[in-house]
Image (cartoon, coloured by chain):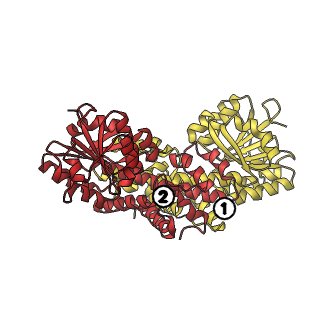
Chain colours: A yellow, B red
């Protein structure tokens, strides 16, 4: 049965920049939403817009038909789902649990198994599209898990995103998000190196973009992030520290799959160098700083 | 004065796949074109369509108002321009020399200086857009050299391309093309690694593209070459051996500019590994083979 505004109580854990945008879109579609966040003050805005508050993940789970989560790191996901007073322990049988965090495929599989053992349905459903996509309801959502559970929560996901694809069983959403991050990270290295070369060679880098951005060198990052790099705008759309987390997951999974990813390894090394220089809270386009200065080590 | 079909004899050296497409577009616009190619048989098609034949670069130069060249490697460019019976020696004063080959910025500068000393105008004008762009007249052309000379040959370039930008003085076209190749090569590593991860993780890679190709991971290569990789279609749009040449130029120039480009260095190493396995005449998307097999070394 599909979860509609008329028949479903939605719980939402994690009201950061991404989560707040998503909760707002659920409220706009008429869903009743109960939220929990570790730091309550970060939920103030969505509470003012009609969301209700729960005092713990467990309390929230006990009152909802579906619980969505978007928290920081895999250890946070594990705590919220599998910890004491967590979602798997407290949710009522038949509840849908949907993790929107970018986390590890293996943890997604463990959660799905634990959920199934208690008569719950768990989906991994990481997103891409950033704060803009969360605000505008245009996220891409990559889903892993049971097909029937996917169909049931689809209306809820459609309130938050546009390109919603079930990629396979438990963990497949996380694996797909890794593909996304792999492609982004290696391309960012190329975008930075192309711009750094342009500037070092004495070219007008803006004019170079005019020549190269619409052809075979073209990419979302070249069109959207290169202009920010050139302006020195390193404000976070997506944090360097989160990219490092994601690339760490990708490399660990690849090792398990016996796949060597030297491009990802290089990008992670460069991002770690940037973080070591104080750039962990910059946006990922700040990788350009490494090249604009002395160049990467 | 602009070079129009009514007032200009055009010479064209290099009637390979790219050059033949360009000559055809010049003929279509009404230009009279004389061609030379090291292997005459490769000029047969354009000769049948109305181009005339010259027996050497020097003979061709002596009869033309503008000479365009697109040959293989920088040493070929040097030979054609600066060698005995070459363009600089044989062209009449006032002739425009336009090199469309992807070659070194420093050679472009040497040619420009030698041309100027003899009262000739030389432009470096490498292209991107591949054989399709050459055939359809939709190439991007990146030009370095004198502004007046650029304006004079612009109608000729417009017969062959669409996105035609003067990037600066002699060598600036080549430098810009290097930016293009840098961005392409590093991104290709990311595209291959994303697909290889998808397949190794047991995902349906086509479906993964549905999730990731239109967002922040999106690129020309992900949309256009990833599907060919998955089909095992490694036919050349752009040769691996030419990519290795271009990345070699980029790295040598970067070293001269004291700029470290680890992403380019990695891509070049992987392409050389592929060439070492017999892939020199494959298309650049064949990089995927390295990952689909045992993975890169």
The residue at the far front in this view is B48
Task: Kindly report the distance in space between the C-alpha atoms of the residues bearing marks 2 and 1.
Answer: 25 Å
Report which residue position mark 2 lands on.
A271
From the viewer's side, name the closer residue of A72 and A210.
Answer: A210
- Determine whether, in the image, residue B75 is placed left or right of residue A86: left
Q: Could you say where residue B70 lies in the image, as x and y percent from the top left?
A: 33, 51
Q: Which residue is drawn at 58% across and 45% down?
A: B213
Q: Mark 1 lies on which chain?
A: B
- The dot on residue B229 is none
- Determine whether, in the image, residue B273 is placed left or right of residue A27: left
Q: Which residue is drawn at 48% across and 65% down?
A: B270
Instruction: Please identify, in this view, whether the residue under mark 2 or under mark 1 is nearer the observer.
Output: 1
* A214 over A196 or under it: above or below: above
- Quadrant of the frame with the N terminus of chain A: top right
Q: Residues within 10 Å of mark 2 (few under 14, many from 20)?
A: many
Asked if badges 2 and 1 are on one and the same chain, I answer no
Q: Residues within 10 Å of mark 1 (few under 14, many from 20)?
A: some
- Determine whether, in the image, residue B236 is placed left or right of residue A110: left
Q: Which residue is drawn at 69% across and 53% down?
A: B204
Q: Could you say where residue A90 lies in the image, as x and y percent from the top left?
A: 82, 49
Q: Could you say where residue A3 lies in the image, as x and y percent from the top left?
A: 80, 36
- Quadrant of the frame with the C terminus of chain A: bottom left
Residue A288 visible in image: no
Report which residue position mark 1 lands on.
B200
From the viewer's side, name the closer residue of A82 and A104.
Answer: A104
- SS assignment at label 2: helix
CB-based contact (under 8 Å), mark 2 and mark 1 = no
Q: Mark 2 lies on which chain?
A: A
From the viewer's side, name the closer residue of A91 and A250.
Answer: A250
- SS assignment at label 1: helix
Which picture quadrant has residue A182?
A: bottom right
């Amino acid at each position: 049965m599909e979860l509609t505004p008329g028949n479903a109580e939605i719980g939402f854990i994690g009201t950061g920049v991404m989560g707040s945008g998503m909760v707002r879109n659920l409220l706009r579609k008429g869903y009743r939403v109960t939220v929990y966040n570790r730091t309550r003050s970060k939920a103030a805005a969505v509470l003012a817009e009609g969301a209700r508050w729960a005092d713990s993940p467990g309390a929230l789970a006990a009152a909802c038909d579906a619980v969505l989560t978007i928290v920081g790191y895999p250890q946070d996901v594990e705590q919220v789902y599998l910890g004491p007073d967590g979602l798997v322990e407290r949710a009522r049988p038949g509840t849908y649990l949907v993790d929107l965090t970018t986390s590890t495929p293996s943890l997604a599989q463990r959660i799905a198994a634990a959920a199934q053992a208690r008569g719950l349905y768990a989906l991994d459903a990481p997103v891409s599209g950033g704060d803009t996509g969360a605000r505008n309801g245009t996220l891409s959502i990559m889903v892993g898990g049971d097909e029937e559970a996917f169909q049931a929560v689809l209306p809820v996901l459609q309130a938050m995103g546009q390109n919603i694809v079930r990629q396979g069983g438990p963990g497949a959403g996380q694996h797909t998000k890794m593909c996304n991050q792999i492609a982004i990270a290696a391309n960012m290295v190329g975008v930075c190196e192309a711009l750094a070369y342009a500037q070092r060679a004495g070219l007008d880098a803006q004019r170079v973009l005019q020549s190269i951005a619409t052809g075979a060198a073209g990419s979302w990052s070249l069109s959207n992030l290169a202009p920010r790099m050139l302006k020195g705008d390193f404000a976070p759309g997506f944090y360097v520290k989160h990219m490092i987390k994601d690339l760490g997951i990708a490399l660990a999974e690849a090792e398990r799959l016996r796949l060597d990813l030297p491009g990802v390894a290089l990008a992670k090394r460069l991002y770690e160098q940037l973080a070591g220089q104080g750039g962990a809270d910059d946006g990922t386009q700040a990788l350009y700083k490494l090249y604009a200065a002395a160049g990467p080590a």
